[in-house]
Image (cartoon, rainbow, N blue to C red):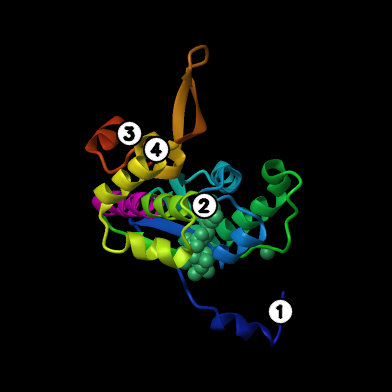
Amino acid sequence: MAKSSFEYVKSYELDDTLLPNTWIVVRIDGKCFHKFAEHHNFTKPNDLRALNLMNYAAYQVMKDTHDICVAFGQSDEYSFIFNKNTAFYKRRGAKLLTTINSKFSSSYVFYWRKFFGDEILQYPPCFDGRIVLYPSAENVIDYLKWRQADVHINNLYNTAFWALVLQGNLSPGQAEKRLCGTVSADKNELLFKEFNINYNKEKEIFKRGTILLKLHVQLDVKKKTVASIIDIHEDMLKEKFWLKYENLLEPTS
Ligand code: DGT
Ligand code: MG
Ligand code: MG
Ligand code: MG
Ligand code: MG
């Protein structure tokens, strides 16, 4: 078939193929979720409905995308890690990022009622997204440790902050002042002594976020393996975790 004289415009499209042989990390994050949380009456400091909805939307993404080996979520963000050798969308960055973000965002809206019931979704939420490439497994592990360390730091602060405001009747400004310059041990002690809260006994999902991973289970009858996605809240900062899940970043066929 003869080419139209317009077809040259296609040559303006830029090649955005991602570097081969590197781990692709896609991270999405809710836009202005400090406001979105207010508008939808999220409980402070953690709303279990919101976290479960994030996890379910991420599960929809992972279920559809064979090459994601692990995902990690906390607050209004989720990171998806692809196998090093993935050829998903021929490693085209824009295709990959927009598809993941779009599937996540539409799932967040589609399953809203499943988690929020009568709490009406007031407006369409929006997520930003980025791609980061890592050349070594060590870098990917450090990336995941970095995101999980962030959960702990924020959650301890937020738990202390909201205890001071909601139970201690301090103003937000006073609570901020009270926590200024304190280290983790101080916040733990404050929670225990003043509010009888043992931080260690807080829910794991609040303290550590959620790791979604694919387990390959062998069906004994046919010797066939099936992948099932599980959610765990274990401590990735401990080496024990990486020994237990030693094949986590290995490509699966
Ligand atoms: P951004 O990402 O630059 O558009 O701005 P934000 O506002 O989304 O900020 P970000 O992503 O750094 O922080 C997430 C915000 O989401 C945080 O300010 C509080 C809110 N948020 C997330 N999860 C919860 C929750 O479970 N409960 C409450 N009350 N707020 C939450
Ligand atoms: Mg942000
Ligand atoms: Mg955000
Ligand atoms: Mg965030
Ligand atoms: Mg098309």
Question: Mark 4 or mark 3, which is nearer the start of the sequence?
Answer: 4
Amino acid type, label 3: Tyr
User: Horizontal and vertical percent for residue 216?
Assistant: 45, 29
Cβ atoms under marks 4 and 2 closer than 8 Å: no
**Which residue matches tag 2?**
166
User: Is residue 71 depicted above or below 33 in this figure?
Assistant: above
- The CA span between labels 2 and 3 is 40 Å
Disc 4/disc 2 C-alpha distance (Å): 14 Å
Amino acid type indicated by mark 2: Leu
> Tag on residue 54?
none
Whether label 2 touches label 3, CB < 8 Å: no
Q: Quadrant of ligand 5?
A: bottom right
Q: Amino acid at mark 1?
A: Ala
Quadrant for the C terminus in the image: top left
* Local crowd size for mark 1, using a 10 Å CA cut-off: few (<14), some (14–19), many (≥20): few
Counting every numbered tag in the picture gives 4
Q: Earlier in the sequence, mark 1 or mark 3?
A: 1
Name the residue type under label 4: Asn
Mark 1 or 3, closer to the camera? 3
Mark 4 / mark 2, whichever is N-terminal: 2
Q: Earlier in the sequence, mark 2 or mark 1?
A: 1
Return the residue nearer the eye: 41 or 36. 41
Distance Cα–Cα, label 1 vs label 4: 78 Å
Mark 3: give few (<14), some (14-19) or many (20+) Cα within 10 Å. Answer: few
The residue that disc 3 covers is 245
Q: Earlier in the sequence, mark 2 or mark 3?
A: 2
Which of disc 4 and disc 1 is earlier in sequence?
A: 1
Q: Nearer the viewer, mark 3 or mark 4?
A: 4
The disc placed on residue 2 is 1
**Which quarter of the image is occupied by the N terminus?**
bottom right
Q: Label for residue 196?
A: 4
